[in-house]
């Protein structure tokens, strides 16, 4: 398959240099050639490919929850979700790097893509994403590689190197593995940690978690009955979004004592924070109004709207030195209390368009600055789990990465009036990304497919769906966290968990040894059905969750 560089496209005042096309790697940079400062949204490289009416593609989403799967570029392919006229701009900004709606007849894949058509197949991928995001805009006969800089200010004469782009002809599964190994290496991936097994409070208790629930589960988890290392408290303990060191009334015990109780039970304390968000009524927002970034309109930036948190949530300006210090302090304090596993959620927010203190940074650099501040406070040994996180900017920053939407006690998501249905909490949505992104495991980080759901009551998952999802978690080699009230699980679930973990460990070991799992039907359908590895083989009907082997 021939892919050649046709030409580069840059806005007035900028020039793109394509310095080298060698060994399948395109090296490029961009310069502000004027005598004044200029903002840069994006530059593009047009790559030609042999004409073909129908191209099958792996479309990768931008952040943890962005849907990823196989589609057809051209007639018959499901359109990019940004084309839904009901989809609000906030969701486009939340689920894509470039918040522009896709043009008619154009599809996008972010950071990496795999393509197959009449004349051959290839994988294209950026070397990383810490300096800017990367989007492939795809249509039959043309691939446009876009470096997204989101309006970053360039000084007069300033030149910036852009992330290299690998073009890897040949088998798409081999290509994805080679790309992930290369990008991980180039971006200093932290992918060598232990296989995490544990418990998480979210998917049974959700926001209603109390200290009493947590302690009841800790008692069960510590009784030797369960093979857990990590015991992770999720959303619900905090006094407000943004105030991570003070507690809600349902959590009377101070956080350091709570971590101590987890350690005393022989487990590693984990805790959830959404470090870049804050509630308008939080202590952090009311005592530091200048820390909140403004939208171009001058109003405070809204990073998420969640009724359970009291509605709109603001975004901290992670480009300010004092905010970075605050983020480091929060992480340092939690670690000093004993919480050595931090789940960092809703971390897409610094990529939103706004009046950031340092206007020279790209959206990707802002996200990374936030993560780097947390790492600086947490230290090198703490396990950082990215969630709601842009993939590219986080390679090298996180130890674990959520690679899909939330599981739920149901298989399919209810329809939503505002589009992006495939991002909603539903086990089927988690399944899609877990299979489609399995090649990233142990190359870019440790994959977090999201939690196992083992209970047979307080759920509308059928026994077959519970089993299919557990096999997907195991077959991906990714993290294995249980998220049920442990009192609801009996000997059968306990024995099943043992087999799931044994398989998961074997798949993980094979991934480390160089043979990660593969999704053979990745390019054939939007929601794949198959996952294969040296240690496990899985086929299920993704519409029903019924296992087929
Ligand atoms: C806690 C949860 C859990 C879960 C995370 C994340 O689009 N949304 O509004 C949206 C809300 C919640 C959500 C994902 C998306 O879940 O993935 O594991 O930690 O937050 O609130």
Image (cartoon, rainbow, N blue to C red):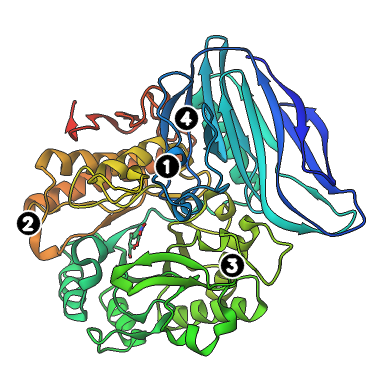
Q: Is residue 106 visible?
A: yes
Residue topped by disc 3: 297
Q: In the rendering, which numbered label is found on residue 290?
A: none
CB atoms at circles 1 and 2 under 8 Å apart?
Answer: no
SS class of the residue under badge 2? loop
Residue topped by disc 4: 58
Of marks 1 and 2, the one in the foreground: 1
In what quadrant of the picture does the C terminus appear? top left
**What is the x, y in percent for residue 247?**
32, 85
Label 1 to label 2: alpha-carbon separation: 47 Å
Label 3 to label 4: alpha-carbon separation: 37 Å
SS class of the residue under badge 3? loop
Which residue lies at the image location 59% right of the left edge and 54% below the top edge?
Answer: 393
Which residue lies at the image location 36% right of the left edge and 36% below the top edge?
Answer: 435
SS class of the residue under badge 1? loop
**What is the x, y in percent for residue 318?**
60, 71
The residue carrying mark 4 has its beta carbon less than 8 Å from ligand 1: no
Label 4 to label 1: alpha-carbon separation: 24 Å
Q: Nearer the viewer, residue 238 or 262?
A: 238
Of marks 4 and 1, the one in the foreground: 1
Residue topped by disc 2: 490
- In the displayed structure, 382 sits above or below 393; it is below
Residue topped by disc 1: 85
The crowding category of the residue bearing disc 4, from other C-alpha atoms within 10 Å (few below 14, some 14 to 19, many at least 20), is many
Label 2 to label 4: alpha-carbon separation: 40 Å
CB atoms at circles 2 and 4 under 8 Å apart?
Answer: no
Q: Earlier in the sequence, mark 1 or mark 2?
A: 1
């Amino acid at each position: 398959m021939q892919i050649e560089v046709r030409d580069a496209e840059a806005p007035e005042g900028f020039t793109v240099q394509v310095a080298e096309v060698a060994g399948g790697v395109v090296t490029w940079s961009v310069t502000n050639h004027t005598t004044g400062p200029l903002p840069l949204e994006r530059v593009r490289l047009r790559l030609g490919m042999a004409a073909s009416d129908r191209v099958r593609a792996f479309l990768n989403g931008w952040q943890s929850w962005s849907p990823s799967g196989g589609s057809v570029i051209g007639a018959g392919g499901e359109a990019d979700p940004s084309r839904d006229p009901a989809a609000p701009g906030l969701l486009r900004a939340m689920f894509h790097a470039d918040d522009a709606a896709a043009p008619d007849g154009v599809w996008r894949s972010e950071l990496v893509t795999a393509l197959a058509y009449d004349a051959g197949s290839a994988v294209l991928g950026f070397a990383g994403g810490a300096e800017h995001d990367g989007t492939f805009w795809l249509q039959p006969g043309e691939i446009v590689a876009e470096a997204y800089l989101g309006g970053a200010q360039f000084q007069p004469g300033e030149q910036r190197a852009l992330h290299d782009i690998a073009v890897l002809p040949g088998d798409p599964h081999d290509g994805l593995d080679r790309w992930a190994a290369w990008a991980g290496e180039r971006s200093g991936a932290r992918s060598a940690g232990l296989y995490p097994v544990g418990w998480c409070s979210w998917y049974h208790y959700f926001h209603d978690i109390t200290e009493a629930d947590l302690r009841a589960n800790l008692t069960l988890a510590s009784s030797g009955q369960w093979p857990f290392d990590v015991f992770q408290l999720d959303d619900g303990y905090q006094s407000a979004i943004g105030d991570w060191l003070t507690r809600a009334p349902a959590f009377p015990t101070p956080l350091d004592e709570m971590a101590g109780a987890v350690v005393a039970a022989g487990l590693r304390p984990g805790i959830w924070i959404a470090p870049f968000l804050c509630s308008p009524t939080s202590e952090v927002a009311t005592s530091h109004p200048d820390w909140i970034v403004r939208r171009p309109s001058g109003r405070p930036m809204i990073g998420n709207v969640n009724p359970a948190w009291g509605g709109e949530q603001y975004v901290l300006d992670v480009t300010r030195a004092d905010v970075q210090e605050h983020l480091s302090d929060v992480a340092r304090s939690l670690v000093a209390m004993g919480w050595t596993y931090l789940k960092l959620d809703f971390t897409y927010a610094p990529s939103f368009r706004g009046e950031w203190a340092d206007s020279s940074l790209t959206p990707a650099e802002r996200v990374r600055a936030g993560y780097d501040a947390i790492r600086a406070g947490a230290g090198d040994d703490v396990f950082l789990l990215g969630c709601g996180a842009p993939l590219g900017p986080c390679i090298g920053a996180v130890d674990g990465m959520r690679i899909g939407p939330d599981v739920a006690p149901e298989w399919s998501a209810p329809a939503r009036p505002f589009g992006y249905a495939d991002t909603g909490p539903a086990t089927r949505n988690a399944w899609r990304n877990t299979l489609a992104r399995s090649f990233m495991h142990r190359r870019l980080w440790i994959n977090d497919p999201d939690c196992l759901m083992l209970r047979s009551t307080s759920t509308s998952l059928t026994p077959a769906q519970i089993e299919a999802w557990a096999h997907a978690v195991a077959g991906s080699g990714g993290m294995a966290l249980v998220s049920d009230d442990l009192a609801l699980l009996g000997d059968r679930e306990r024995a099943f968990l043992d087999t799931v973990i044994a398989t998961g460990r074997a798949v993980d070991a094979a991934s480390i040894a160089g043979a990660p799992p593969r999704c053979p039907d990745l390019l054939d359908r939007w929601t794949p059905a198959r996952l294969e590895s040296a240690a496990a083989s899985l086929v299920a009907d993704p519409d029903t969750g019924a296992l087929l082997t």
